[in-house]
Amino acid sequence: MQSKMKALVKDKAGPGAAIIDMEIPKLGPHDVLVKVISTAICGTDLHIYRWDKWAASRIKPPLVMGHEMSGTIVKTGSAVKNWHDGDYVTLECHQTCGYCYQCRTGQGHICRDYSILGVDFDGCFAEYVRVPETNLWAIDQQIPPEVACLQDPVGNAVLATASTDIAGKTVMVTGCGAIGLFAVGVARVLGAAKIYAVDLIDYRLNIAEQMGSTKTINPLRMNPVEEVLLDTGGDGVDVVVEMSGNEQCLHYGLKAVKNGGRVALLGLPEEKISLNLTNDVIFKGVTLAGITGREIFATWYKTAALLKNNLDIRHVITHQMKMEQFADAFRIIQSGQSGKIILYP
Amino acid sequence: MQSKMKALVKDKAGPGAAIIDMEIPKLGPHDVLVKVISTAICGTDLHIYRWDKWAASRIKPPLVMGHEMSGTIVKTGSAVKNWHDGDYVTLECHQTCGYCYQCRTGQGHICRDYSILGVDFDGCFAEYVRVPETNLWAIDQQIPPEVACLQDPVGNAVLATASTDIAGKTVMVTGCGAIGLFAVGVARVLGAAKIYAVDLIDYRLNIAEQMGSTKTINPLRMNPVEEVLLDTGGDGVDVVVEMSGNEQCLHYGLKAVKNGGRVALLGLPEEKISLNLTNDVIFKGVTLAGITGREIFATWYKTAALLKNNLDIRHVITHQMKMEQFADAFRIIQSGQSGKIILYP
Amino acid sequence: MQSKMKALVKDKAGPGAAIIDMEIPKLGPHDVLVKVISTAICGTDLHIYRWDKWAASRIKPPLVMGHEMSGTIVKTGSAVKNWHDGDYVTLECHQTCGYCYQCRTGQGHICRDYSILGVDFDGCFAEYVRVPETNLWAIDQQIPPEVACLQDPVGNAVLATASTDIAGKTVMVTGCGAIGLFAVGVARVLGAAKIYAVDLIDYRLNIAEQMGSTKTINPLRMNPVEEVLLDTGGDGVDVVVEMSGNEQCLHYGLKAVKNGGRVALLGLPEEKISLNLTNDVIFKGVTLAGITGREIFATWYKTAALLKNNLDIRHVITHQMKMEQFADAFRIIQSGQSGKIILYP
Amino acid sequence: MQSKMKALVKDKAGPGAAIIDMEIPKLGPHDVLVKVISTAICGTDLHIYRWDKWAASRIKPPLVMGHEMSGTIVKTGSAVKNWHDGDYVTLECHQTCGYCYQCRTGQGHICRDYSILGVDFDGCFAEYVRVPETNLWAIDQQIPPEVACLQDPVGNAVLATASTDIAGKTVMVTGCGAIGLFAVGVARVLGAAKIYAVDLIDYRLNIAEQMGSTKTINPLRMNPVEEVLLDTGGDGVDVVVEMSGNEQCLHYGLKAVKNGGRVALLGLPEEKISLNLTNDVIFKGVTLAGITGREIFATWYKTAALLKNNLDIRHVITHQMKMEQFADAFRIIQSGQSGKIILYP
């Protein structure tokens, strides 16, 4: 095997990134080396690429970017027993501590002290990536690489959407970026009665429709709350899945949700948000559920089963490019005219 | 309005039934009179028709049979405010006491002291039926009468199947009578990964396949437990929905269910059943959930929404007949070569 | 029986109230007349008494105030079957519509269209009160009247506190008004490991200690977040019960709650509250649950059982007075130097 | 450190056991060595001691017996980072595979492929025991050794009892061996309204009373079902915790449980049990929950918190002996005149 590889690296503290040659990672006894087949760009990668305030405070260059991928194991550490060369795998990017309250009670995804592949240590936008064995997830051979590398963000959508009863219920998804679009699809295959997809960009709403929304709402043209209340006989929706991080969207959700309903919050507001808790949450008996990551590995089992049997996410994959074209890819993402972009190393 | 109507009546303590002319029911202040459009035959009706041990102990002839129907309100009692002439309705057949612990905690379907329309007081196999207003359920105009009259048994299937997480899970339905067939359809629209349908009668298994089962298993030809374990990599299924009341089927379910899995019991065994609780339930951490009726009206909301938006049950409706042909209908049911039979008054 | 009674009435649109003679209420067929034994003053009564913005927008004088009481049935409407003269009762003050989605799915406490006794129609600060039969709750004879009239606010505390797993968990109660003090007691009898009671008024913290808090925290003297984190090894608390409606208290709760924890919101903020949802809710996987009223009657069963068997709330009853002393009572409440005040008609 | 230790060993395939000198265990990189302070005898140990059918089929002598203990770490394997010499610890005896569906979804206690310390590999009835680091549980210094070694069986009781809502509910514990007695105590500190303790041996019922039962029932003197129904106004109990494995006890539980109630099954029947599922489970909407082991480590957190703050189990510790007196200890257990017996090495 060669000793060098190409990798897309955040090489300095500032905007941009570069493809550079570097050493293929060394393995500890519980690590494996994966030859990367496909990767996908996440919003987190864009933060790092643009070098915003969050990125500047968290990232220590040089760092190999990326945490969504599929690949094949080519080498295993000395203590690895359950994984083998040739295994087709993807990864959970949260490396959990294993010893905190959350980790020891099946809630590792909200571990008190985790680090993230592609954020806190080298990621997968490269020919090879080192992965701790406990972070691996085996992929069914029927799942093609461009889908297989998306189980991490689809898992976000599954945890946000499928952790409450959806069958026969009405669902509003605010924010139709990739995870919002996946959420529309998840709600569809779980038997939602109505799915209202809300976004300011028609390109995204068109994909939402392909993913199974029953009505798309662009707030530039109509009021989401009025539409939803009209369509539900004044009851409002059972479930809101907030994927935008946008204050106005959250207000739409809180006004549109039914008494006793549930609002899952996954989109990350950049600023504080001001809420009328008395009227919108307390008197309505509404629950707001903060959602982050994916349950390790309960969500993975469900996500993999849905992708294999029910859920077709290919409408969301709008672009597939070579890793060298990363600058084009990030430009397209920022235009808002994309779903998910796959990068091949 | 005429004063007499035709009704299918259990007229004496013994097998059979007769169509007779009788007075149209009088209304109390909280009752409505419904002109019946469609009805359906349930297993309970067959018990009463055949006059088995249970029927002989419970039924007091003369009694108008039947509890599954759709119709139109033609008259309302003096205190009825929320229902009106012309409303398209069906009914919950359990008349609950309203005052017991179960009734006052949202569990009216397991009321300590309920009576059943068509069992304990006059039913709906007639031109008209008297219904207490709190038992009414409004039907969406898009639902045709032959489907609308089936919300009671579809509701059984919904309560048994949808009261646990089904999305991406593996499900085994043992017993493909009408409610078992509905359960297959419910599991399908809720996003089950695999649905194993088990029955001794191929006619029913063919319908199960039309309803969305991924594999049909006739124990006369193969061992359900071996099939399911093989297909799930030895894990077993997440959920068993037991609809047969058959001892052997329950054993299949208990052997095929995964550690930590759930077995919903709705089929009614006629005899005691002998269980290896230590190995099949306790060491496996399995839950057995007794299911009866439908939640009033949580299950109705979900059932109605699924029927309107996702769930097509028409494959299960194998026969549609005039009420006068009741003898033929009961003979067909006993042959096992039917799904659900609709009777029109 | 006399035809007139004394009642404490909001007699005009403005601050204050008056005791006046008025007709004893007439009964509809489903009503009962209750001779009032004891009543208690709620924060809602204070709003009405002071005639704040909310009261001015909602209340239509003249109105008999009050909704917390115990009494004895002295007359029943013609259609009432399950209640009898001499029954020792209290009442659920929310009169629900009975026909909305919430009412028909066991969530009547968040009915879309309810009215409140003592707010929207005449209340119980009187010698007699008319109560719809479905709002009655039978009291065990062992419960004395000064306790029996408090099942409504204790029920608030029970719904807020006991709707999640408390046993062996750490709980922080922010705001030690009467309902907060009840919440401390509820957490205690449910087996909480640690109960942190937070309030600015030492008088209330002393009662919290009597109710079973393990540590009282006055933010004037120490930082609640630092105290709680120190005491829990940095993990934070499992459950926050927010009873103050105070913005600062909610921030304490969100900073002190554990990853994956739950914050029950019952205290009503008068203004909008600004939240850092990203760091305090989403990344922590925290759930905020809006709580209002009490489940009808699931919470009543639990509350009554706790009051009879485990939960002693007498420390919270700091004053017992004649109804004529209402002006003194309201003045004491506003001083902050009280728990719950009982008024006898 | 010495190289030899004394251990209580199942030395041959047949009844009995012997104390022998043996090598102190060697450690793998992820193991620790614990110097044993206290141990306790479990029903499993009695099966092994008596060499019944189960033991003969499972145990491969020679084997150091025992799996309940407390001790101090005296040595750690080369890869152990989170545990240190001097740590006061106990252990989870189930060594789980870490890779099956159950292990990867937070249900390791029902792992498809686990082995048990003291059953499948050497146990803790010895001066020293080797423990894999992932099986360790840190003990609070306030917990004395005779209590600390009981967290495993108390955990059984916690999982069986506390996994449903107990506060203000009525509970029936059938079978007052040690785990049943712990269950009585758990129900008490969780705020149960009534706790009915059922056993044939008055010695045990006396301890049940000390642990907080509100009524003890010896079926030799009265009918448990009649007593419970009478005492609950005919409703029956909310929760049954079946700890006996006895067929008659399970029937008591099923007849005494309320419609919609829950029956936790932990006692292990030696034979098949015949159930009237139709009347006792399905029509009543009852749930039977098989319970085994303890959640790893959710149950441990709860158990430890209850033992430290609320739950006093010392009434159940009826005997404390030197390990050399093991023959006496096993004889006392078989007499039925004991709670829990502590053995000191």
Image (cartoon, coloured by chain):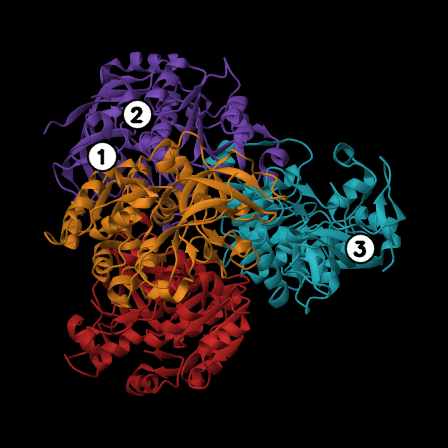
Chain colours: A cyan, B red, C purple, D orange
Secondary structure under tag 3 reads: strand
Residue in the picture at 22% in, 34% down: C308
Q: Please name the amino acid that badge 1 sits on.
A: Lys
Mark nearest the camera among 1 and 3 is 3
The image quarter in which residue B24 lies: bottom left
Tell me, yes or no, whether dots 2 and 3 are on the same chain: no
Q: Please name the amino acid that badge 3 sits on.
A: Tyr
Looking at the image, residue B176 sits to the left or right of residue B120; the answer is: right
Give the labeled residue for mark 3.
A128
Q: Which mark is residue B78?
A: none
Q: Which mark is residue C65?
A: 2
Q: In the rendered image of this protein, does residue D84 appear above or below residue A83?
A: above
Of the 4 image quadrants, the one containing the C terminus of chain A is bottom right
Does the residue at mark 1 contact the one at mark 2 (Cβ under 8 Å)? no
Does the residue at mark 2 contact the one at mark 3 (Cβ under 8 Å)? no
Q: In the rendered image of this protein, does residue A273 appear above or below residue B56?
A: above
Q: Is residue D162 visible from the viewing direction of this image?
A: no
Residue D224 locus on image (x, y percent)? 16, 53
